Amino acid sequence: QDGVECGLTIQQQLNLRPFAKIIELKPMYGMFLIHTTIAEVLNRLWCVHEVDEALLAGIEIFGAIDTNRWTEKQFDKMVDTVYTRNAICQGQDREMLTNLIQERGGFDRLDEKAVEVRKQAKADLLAALS
C-alpha cells in the first residue's frame, strides 16, 4: 500500500507497467543510463528492467557520466564488468522481474548491451578529457 487512503497497492501499481508505458512513448532523446562513482546503477534489478524495456521498445540507450568525477582508470574498472543477473530488489519483485527478463531472452543480452553503452560512454569520456 502506498499509504494513501483508497490508493493502489504496490502490486496494482506494478500491474499498470509504469516503466513500460513511459518507454513505449518513444522518448525523442532515448534513454540515459546514469553512471555514478557512488553506486552501480545495474546492481538494482528495477534499473535492469528499465534497460530491458528500452531494448524491447527499440529505444536507443546512452551512457551518461560526470566528466568531473570520473577518470579513465575508474571507468576502466567497470566498463566490461556487468552481471545484471546479480542485481537485487525485494523478493517477490525479484522473481517477477527475473521471469520477465528470462522470457525476453535473458540477462546475457542485457549485459552485452550495457557493455556496449559503457564502451561508448568511455569513448565520450576520453574525448571530453582530451
Image (cartoon, grey):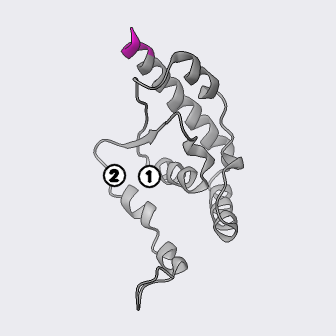
Q: Which numbered tag is attached to residue 57? A: 1
Secondary element under disc 2, as helix, strand or loop, is: loop
Q: Amino acid at mark 2?
A: Lys
First in residue order: circle 1 vs circle 2: 2
Q: Which numbered tag is attached to residue 65? A: none
Q: Is residue 104 above or below residue 3?
A: above
Q: How many marks?
A: 2
Depth check: give the residue in front, 103 or 11. 11
Q: Which numbered tag is attached to residue 26? A: 2
* Residue that lies at the very extreme toward the left in this rendered image: 28
CB under 8 Å between discs 1 and 2 = yes
Which residue is at a point 59% across and 51% down the rendered structure image? 44
Q: Amino acid at mark 1?
A: Ala
Mark 1 to mark 2 CA distance (whole Å): 8 Å
Question: How dense is the environment of label 1, judged by Cα within 10 Å: few (below 14), some, or many (20 and up)?
Answer: some
Residue 103: name its quadrant. Answer: bottom right
Which residue is at a point 28% across and 45% down the rendered structure image? 28
Q: Which residues are magenta?
A: 126-130
Secondary element under disc 1, as helix, strand or loop, is: helix
- Residue 62: x %, y % from top left: 42, 35
* Residue that lies at the very extreme toward the bottom in this rendered image: 6
Left or right, residue 110 beside residue 85: left
Q: Is residue 56 above or below residue 110?
A: below
Depth check: give the residue in front, 58 or 32. 32
